[in-house]
Structures are given as structure tokens and as C-alpha cells.
Image (tube, rainbow, N blue to C red):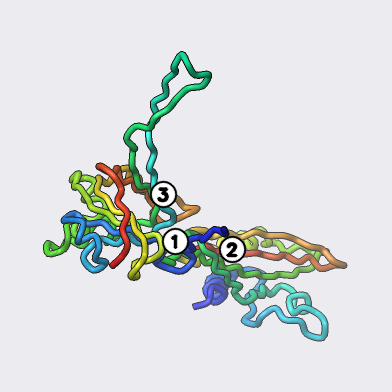
């Protein structure tokens, strides 16, 4: 199961009684505009990005590799009228990193960006396992 | 004359065999404990030096004294190689693993292959005791790794694979 699916399943429940929902679609651009900007108050989760790097190189080539998976999620809201439960929403999205099991590192970093009257939250999930 | 490096980029070029039985068993990859997951290996042949001064010379003279021989390596802890197969029919090094031969202070015979185990390849042999195990792990590198030292009893001998 892709981490994106795990995160979506977790957020479907965690955000069920809030002012935002989770979209099943990928955050692609439609007519030059990102979907999460067009459909505000929907969390869009991008595909998994996976990289494998050698943690311990060995002389017999039984190298130990480390797998890093990054997933990005987006949420756009009206910058003029803050959602009343935005703190709960952000907390739930940040905490959903713990839904992915079997990782040595479960991190989520949030950044914000305001353009015109749209406030966009970007969540960068980072998972590492060996 | 250009140097002829021994390239170990391919797998299984730098190889270490251990046997608790005898030197002949250490020659056999099937019977010996082949230490897996080595990250590095160092062969230390360090002679001592005795220096003395004489009245007819402006500089010290020196002679070397018997060497301290040692093998040291770092490896990923493989549970079978570290704790042994537990199979009584196996060579004791294989049966008890690195931890077993260290704990039991079992003498081991070793072969260190420089460029693989094919016919004509060079290796150093000797005997000694496994020491210096210190398995460690942390969340940044969540795989057990350990240094291993073989304190060599006597000299290294050089051979070629038949």
C-alpha cells in the first residue's frame, strides 16, 4: 500500500468532522491551475517519491540500503476568513505521519504561502526505513 | 613501473574465512565461517623497534623486534555469523559464531583473501583469537554493526589458492 493511501485513509477519519475534506485525486493542474487552488478546503495528497541509498556499503555487496519516501500534501483556504478549526486540521495532518508504520523516521514539515487571497499549506512528509 | 592495484569493487574479493578446527578447514568456504557484510578490513603487521646509540655514530641505530600481528574489521551483524548456526556438525567457528568464539576464547584459524578465492589468488593465513566485539546500533543507523579484532598468535603466512 502506497504511503499516500495510508495517509489518505488516516486523514479521511481524522478530518471527517472538520471544515475540510480529503480528495482522492492527485494535485494535478487543470487549465494551468493546480487543483488544490481551484478546490479550496480539500486536502490533496501527491504520489510517493522514493529514493534508495546505501547506508552501509560492504565488501561482499550485501549492502544495507535505506529507503526514503517523501509525500507532499496541499491544502488551500481563504486567506481572508480563517477556518475556525484550522488548528485542529493542521494538527491532524501533521499527526497523520504516525499512521505509516515500520519507519525509523516519521517526519512532517509544514510551510505556508499566501498568493492573492489564497493561503496554501504545504505538508512535506518524510519517511525513512532500512 | 605502473602500480597494479588489487581492486575489490566486485563482490567477494576481500574475504575472511575462520575455522576453529584447523588451517585446512579455513581454506574451505563451505566448512569455514565466511564473515559476511564486512565494511572494511585492516591487516596490521607492526614490528617493534629497538634503538640504540653508539659513540662512533652521529645517528641512532635501529633493529626491529617481533611484530604484533592483528586483523581488524567492521561488519554488519549477521545473526547466523554472529551467534552461530548451533549445528553440532559444523566447524566450531560456524557453530558458535563470532560471539561464541570470542566468549569461549576459542583459537581460530583464518584466511584473508586479497582478490577472491579463485585459483591463484593470494591470501594470508594465521591463527589467533577473536576479540573487540562491540555491537552498536542507533536510530540514525538502525542496523547492528560491530568491530571485530583478531589478535594473531604468531606470524602471518602467505599462500596462493591452489
The answer to which quarter of the image holds residue B47 is top left
* Nearer to the camera, B127 or B82: B127
**Neighbour tally class for label 1: few under 14, some 14-19, many 20 plus, Cα within 10 Å:** many
Which chain is home to disc 1?
A: A
Horizontal and vertical percent position of residue B9: 49, 65
How far apart are the two marked residues, 3 and 2, measured between alpha carbons? 37 Å
Residues behind callouts 1 and 3 on a single chain: no
Residue at 18%, 47% (x, y): give it: B106
- Residue A109 falls left or right of residue B56: right
Relative to B110, A69 lies left or right: right
Q: How many neighbours does mark 2 have within 10 angstroms: few (below 14), some (14-19), or many (20 or more)?
A: some
Left or right, B24 with reference to B150: left
Question: Where the N terminus of chain B falls, by quadrant?
Answer: bottom right
From the image, tell me which residue sits under label 1.
A58
Front residue (pair B62, A124): B62
Q: Seen from this angle, which residue lies furthest front?
A: B56
* Rendered location of residue A105, percent (x, y): 52, 58
| Residue A22, horizontal then vertical, whole percent | 63, 75
Q: Which residue is mark 2?
A: A126
> Mark 1 or mark 3: which is in front?
3
Q: Would you name the residue on which mark 3 appears?
A: B42
Name the residue: 54% across, 77% down.
A5
Pinpoint residue B117: horizontal percent, then vertical percent.
34, 67
Under circle 1, the secondary element is loop
Marks 1, 2: nearer the viewer: 1
Q: Using a 10 Å C-alpha cutoff, classify the residue at mark 3 as few (fewer than 14 neighbours), some (14 to 19) or many (20 or more).
A: few
| Callout in the foreground (3, 2) | 3
Measured in 3D between alpha carbons, the distance from the residue under mark 1 to the one under mark 2, in whole angstroms, is 26 Å
Q: Chain of mark 2?
A: A
Answer whether labels 1 and 3 touch (C-beta < 8 Å): no
Amino acid at each position: 500500500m502506497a504511503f499516500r493511501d495510508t495517509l489518505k485513509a488516516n486523514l479521511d477519519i481524522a478530518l471527517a468532522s472538520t471544515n475540510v475534506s480529503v480528495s482522492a485525486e492527485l494535485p494535478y493542474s487543470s487549465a494551468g491551475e493546480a487543483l488544490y487552488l481551484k478546490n479550496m478546503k480539500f486536502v490533496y495528497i501527491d504520489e510517493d517519491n522514493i529514493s534508495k541509498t546505501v547506508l552501509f556499503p560492504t565488501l561482499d555487496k550485501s549492502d544495507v540500503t535505506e529507503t526514503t519516501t517523501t509525500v507532499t500534501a496541499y491544502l488551500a483556504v481563504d486567506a481572508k476568513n480563517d477556518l475556525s478549526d484550522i488548528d485542529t486540521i493542521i494538527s491532524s495532518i501533521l499527526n497523520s505521519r504516525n499512521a505509516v508504520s515500520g519507519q525509523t523516521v516519521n517526519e512532517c514539515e509544514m510551510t505556508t504561502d499566501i498568493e492573492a487571497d489564497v493561503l496554501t499549506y504545504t505538508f512535506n512528509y518524510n519517511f525513512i526505513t532500512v | 613501473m605502473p602500480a597494479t592495484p588489487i581492486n575489490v569493487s566486485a563482490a567477494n574479493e576481500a574475504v575472511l574465512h575462520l575455522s576453529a578446527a584447523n588451517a585446512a578447514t579455513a581454506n574451505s568456504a563451505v566448512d569455514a565461517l565466511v564473515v559476511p557484510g564486512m565494511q572494511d578490513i585492516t591487516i596490521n603487521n607492526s614490528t617493534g623497534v629497538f634503538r640504540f646509540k653508539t659513540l662512533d655514530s652521529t645517528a641512532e641505530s635501529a633493529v626491529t623486534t617481533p611484530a604484533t600481528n592483528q586483523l581488524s574489521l567492521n561488519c554488519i551483524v549477521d545473526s547466523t555469523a554472529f551467534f552461530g548456526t548451533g549445528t553440532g556438525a559444523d566447524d566450531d567457528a560456524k557453530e558458535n559464531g563470532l560471539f561464541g568464539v570470542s566468549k569461549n576464547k576459542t583459537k581460530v584459524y583464518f584466511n584473508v583473501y586479497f582478490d577472491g578465492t579463485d585459483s591463484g589468488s593470494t591470501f594470508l593465513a594465521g591463527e589467533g583469537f577473536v576479540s573487540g566485539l562491540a555491537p552498536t546500533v542507533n536510530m540514525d543507523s538502525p542496523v547492528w554493526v560491530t568491530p571485530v579484532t583478531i589478535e594473531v598468535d604468531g606470524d602471518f603466512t602467505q599462500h596462493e589458492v591452489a
